[in-house]
Amino acid sequence: MAEVKLPCETTRVVSMDCFHSIPDAPDVPDEADVADDPEKGKKGKKEKIFKTSDDVAFYRRQMQGPNLQHRALLDTMEVTEKGACVQLLESDSQTRLLLSLSPCKNDTVRILIDELQPIKARYRVPDVLTGEPQCEQLRVERRTEDSVTLSWSSGRHQVRVWHFPFRLELLCDDEVMVTFNSKSKLWFEKLRDPPSELQEDETSSLWKETFQQFVDVKANGPSSIGADLCLHGFNHVYGLPEHADSLQLRDTRDGEPYRLYNLDVFAYGVYSRFGLYGSVPLLLAHKPDRTLGVFWLNASETFVNLRYSPADGQDDQTPSVEKRCLQPETDVHWLSESGVIDCMVLLGPSPQQLFSQYAQLTGYQAMPPLFALGYHQCRWNYNDEADVKAVDAGFDDHNIPYDVIWLDIEHTHEKRYFTWDPVCFPEPARLQQYLGYKKRKLVVISDPHFKTDPDWSLYREARDGGHFVKNREGDLFKGLCWPGESCYLDFSSPATREWYSRCFGLDKYKGSTPLLFVWNDMNEPSVFHGPEKTMPKDAVHYGGWEHRELHNLYGFYQHMATAEGLIMRSGGKERPFVLARSFFAGSQRFGAVWTGDNVATWEYLKISIPMLLSLNVTGIMFCGADVGGFFWDPDPELLVRWYQAGALQPFFRGHCAKLSKRREPWLFGEEVTAAIRSVIQERYCLLPFWYTLFYQAHTSGVPPLRPLWVEFPREESTFAIDNQYMIGGALLACPVVERSVQEVKVLLPGDDEIWYDIDSKEAHEGGKTVTLPVTLDTVPVFQRGGSVVCRAAASGSCTAQLQSFPLSITVALNSQGAADGELYLDDGHSFNYRDKKAFCLRRFSMHSGRLRCRPASEDGTFDCDTVVQSVTILGVKSKASTATVHLSGTKDTAAVFQYTDTCNMLTVSELNLRASQDWDIQIG
């Protein structure tokens, strides 16, 4: 037990059990990688807490069982306006399945397999798809004894169903792209009635499974499913977050499969395929001429095995000539504990088209309020109101902008959410008003567990309203979390979500104001003494569904209900901001996520980049990692480097644990303060660019953070790179993520590209790797030739000031002397951009020495006063003699300009051109 003195002169006893109940707690350094390899837990002092695949009965059954031979009964095929259906028969058991094929209008093919006549309905994931995909009419192109070939639309794409052994091929221009059931891994365990008496024999694990002291009783018996797909011509695949691993997924023959099972893994191991806090069952495959996606819509525990062929580890006896002749392919094997097979193949063919296809299925990234893209300052915990005000003043005193300060669980009254500690936070509304006077916000935590306290009115309301998850006996499920014994809200119930949303109303949430926003933590859900520190799979949810069916949806549903609560609070007018730790496909519709409880080491800084890239390419775009590391104490160099990286990522929050030392940016000496101040100020100046990228994500599905291959899809040298990335299509970032380095190597893709160092303005040819000297102040960022980037001319103290600042535009010319880019403007906080078309979208384009500002959309009606103050043009080969401004309805005027021949840069200054008006600048 540790005793902690708080500034509000109370004494709190902090139990260390909350850390020691978690594997790989960093205060036991020799076990810091237990989460990476749960087997190590057996060898150390602590018991094994997390499973490996060998501990999972359904995984063992499928991997050790026979390849079942299914045949497609082609004479049962029916073609309707919604696609085609055909029965499948498994020869040995005579099990009949129903395969439904649905080509959709957005170049997506849905493969759905269920029992033909189940004894009861199997779970199908609701609420993730934003609507039923619109189907294309299929037609029969060719029919033989062995197969039926179907096509749709222009006939370019086809699907071919083979009789025996059953397989399904997807073709484009007569070339097979994907084969479903290529290796006959199709597995579908029928639901059955339980036996009258359970025998303790080799079949007992079908109905009851034990891990450590936990017994999982399966009401429906074995119900697992599995299928394999062969992706022809591909040997680079990505996605499947969340894992602390490389961007390109690895061949799993050498170890564990990728696990998708949301868990609270404190100080998780790096370069690991074990599951973390969230799951997105979307896999992307890429080759120079096509990007393809596979979306496996299943919310139960899922494993994914990958096998690349030809593989790097191919048999050395294979002749080299034969190796060269083999076409690459990737085999993907999905295995899930329950539900139905609901697999969607996204046909691309470009990365941008695939992102759009996925967004049309699961929803677009929510448009965040502008303040959410600023800097957030968090700690477990800021101790009282005076502490919050002192930290707030510290940012002003040190001229460091920030927008939001956060309160962790200690702000509540004895861990009851929607309450305030009466001693340390006696006047929360006044505190929010104090921050609001400076245009800043407050975020508080709201976890999914409720303290079991019959004297607490909100607990009684939830209990009496039937809003808690039940155990298998039908009583309230009770687990241990921060308050002690707790009940867990059943967010899968629409009524519970509606009730929870109403809890955020200003009349119900006492002490809250419209300046208060929310953080959902522990929503995997985390149950300290539960199996794998989560809820037992045989707990029971709304509709009688077992927790095993929807485990990975739990945090998704809390995120949904919280966001809806904040929208309801404003009468549907204001955009919410909600950060959640757990997530699923579609969580992008509700707000932001972060990578959980990382550690203050260089390894965690380095792994944060591929983790965030994996999230971005799978739709979860508003994401970040705790700057500085949640646990342990970063040295000054690591802290500066982490701020530099965090400022170039979508969600930007400094956060640490209560046992870590205080680490506000000004506590490490002036050199460190100045370095952190510089990168935060640059982040704020760049917010017009970030905000525009989020509008594009919100409307087109293209992520703000992009692996290099997204922008350079034909350059194989980019396919495995995950230490550098693109911010939009304009900026290339390569944060320094290693200690004491004096130089970094940066790949600048594109043989015909020009890249400009944003600090020195030096131009570099693409298609090369450059070596860049670095100091502690260096943040390697390059602007791509052919792009236009809009910045605020000043950073201010928070985002509310940005809209009053003029803009500075940087035009980076490509080899043809051209460039273009966009700027998005709205009020920064409301839904008026959506409901009243109150937005302004402008395009800047430069050709033949003329920069034009024109509307990029005719829909917007937002007339703002934002002006362009200066234009910097990079790559101007010769000194200009004139710069003339043309504004419709006025005389042409000469502009002030300066040419810097050392870096071929022309700066036009002292402008006052409204961004919402049409104008030209001609350079002569």
Image: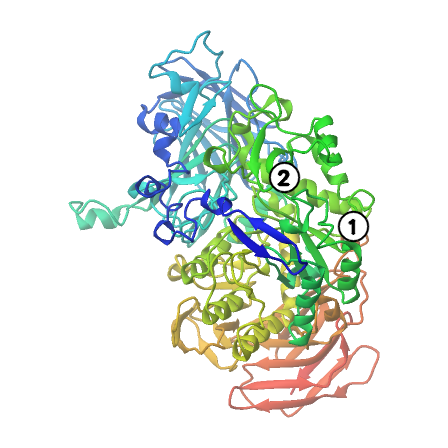
Q: Residue 643: x and y, percent?
A: 53, 67
- Tell me which corner region of the image, top left, top right, bottom left or bottom right, holds residue 129: top right
- Left or right, 317 with respect to 791, comes to left
Is residue 710 positioned above or below 529 on the image? below
Q: Residue 705: x and y, percent?
A: 54, 59
The disc at residue 130 is none
Q: Secondary structure at mark 1?
A: loop
Which residue lies at the image location 34% right of the left edge and 32% below the top edge?
Answer: 54
- Left or right, 571 with respect to 611, comes to right
Q: Residue 831: x and y, percent?
A: 77, 52
Q: Amino acid at mark 2?
A: Pro
In the rendered image, the quadrant that contains the C terminus is bottom right
Compare residues 282 and 822 and report the one nearer the observer: 282
Is residue 467 positioned above or below 511 on the image? above
Alpha carbons under labels 1 and 2: distance apart: 20 Å
The disc at residue 448 is 2
Task: Name the residue that disc number 1 marks.
Answer: 511
Residue 182 visible somewhere in the drawing: no
